[in-house]
Amino acid sequence: MEYSWKTKRRFNSYSDYIRTFFSERVQKISIDAGFTCPNRDNTKGAGGCTYCNNTNFRPGYITPQITIKDQIDKGIAFFKEKYHTQKYLAYFQSFTNTYASLSILKKLYEGALSHPKIIGIVISTRPDAVNEEILNYIKDLSEKYYVAIEYGIESTLDKTLKKINRCHTYREAINAIKMTHQRKIQTGAHMILGLPGESRKDIINHAVELSGLPIQTLKLHQLQINRNTVMYREFIKSPESFNILSADEYVELIVDFLEVLNPQIIIERFISESPLNQLVTPRWGLKNFEIVDKIEKRLKERDTWQGKHY
């Protein structure tokens, strides 16, 4: 494989991948299908992940109170004002989007795919919320449509996963990813960098661990302390337990992370932006593209790239 930086960028860019995969512009439309999570409903735990205020990551045009078709129509109307987008992916984003019976999942997924502007689905879920039956069904869908599953791993350390109340292990993440890959379903992972108790060495080792997994895409973002979360209360009580990075520190960490990461893994995202009225820290005052510009500048300054030390 030719590293993407040799043509355009020094990391394997999701936007480049999408432009290559599809012949026209494609946009994700977020959907809230009304799911919950097994660490919220007392199946495995209660309260959800300590950092989670899920409404922060949900666009204003979606709500589980309206139908999936209406959410898609609202999303299309929203993006039409910004882009001349021709086709869309239905992004089942909020909470755990495989956490239901197969009959319910079929109704939801096929309902989205029946929309004339939808050419595929992206399913965000937890590694402990899939099984052979669900994955076999998703495999069948993937033979007709573009389908991707994103697993929230968040950390490769079980002590961290326990601390943030994920209620699953890293081994469960490995197993889910391998089961998905075996069915030739596009597989992605999501990680939070800077979780409490994790050292810089721990974070770089996440990249080493992920490099050995059969994932195609990776989403990264900085730890954010948001209001109305358990982690916010922990931060107020004991701020010295958190290592909140400045923007420049985070950029340097990302560059170190990229250097040891498998160059074939596609980077879908480097940061996340919580609403300012909910975000406590870090408040960098920078947009996503500005952080990406800083990362690309630092990669060039250090004459390095994704996978240089892989």
Image: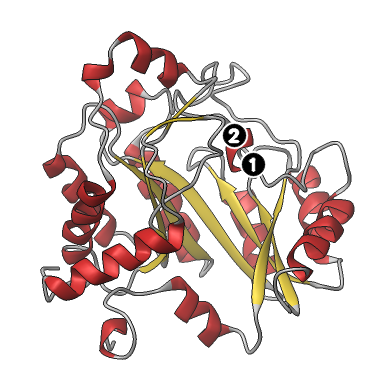
> Image quadrant of residue 114?
bottom right
If you read the primary sequence from the N terminus, does the residue marked by circle 1 or circle 2 appear first? 2
Residue type at mark 2: give it.
Answer: Asn
Residue 94, which numbered label?
1
> Image quadrant of residue 66?
top right
Q: Nearer the viewer, residue 88 or 150?
A: 88
Residue type at mark 1: give it.
Answer: Ser
Residue 221 position within the rendered picture, expressed as x and y whole percent measured from the top left: 39, 48
Q: Nearer the viewer, residue 278 or 285?
A: 285
Q: Residues within 10 Å of mark 2 (few under 14, many from 20)?
A: few
Q: Are the residues at dot 1 and dot 2 in contact (C-beta closer than 8 Å)? A: yes
Query: On the picture, is 97 further left or further right than 1?
Result: right
From the image, tell me which residue sits under label 2.
Answer: 54
Residue 275, which numbered label?
none
Colour approach in the figure: secondary structure
Against 43, residue 127 (above or below) is: below
What residue is at 28 percent from the left and 12 percent from the top? Answer: 238
Residue 87 position within the rendered picture, expressed as x and y whole percent measured from the top left: 74, 76
Residue 275 in view, yes or no = yes
Query: On the picture, is 291 further left or further right than 51?
Result: left
Query: On the picture, is 88 further left or further right than 43?
Result: right
Q: CA distance from mark 1 to mark 2?
A: 7 Å
Q: Is label 2 in a helix, a strand or a loop?
A: helix
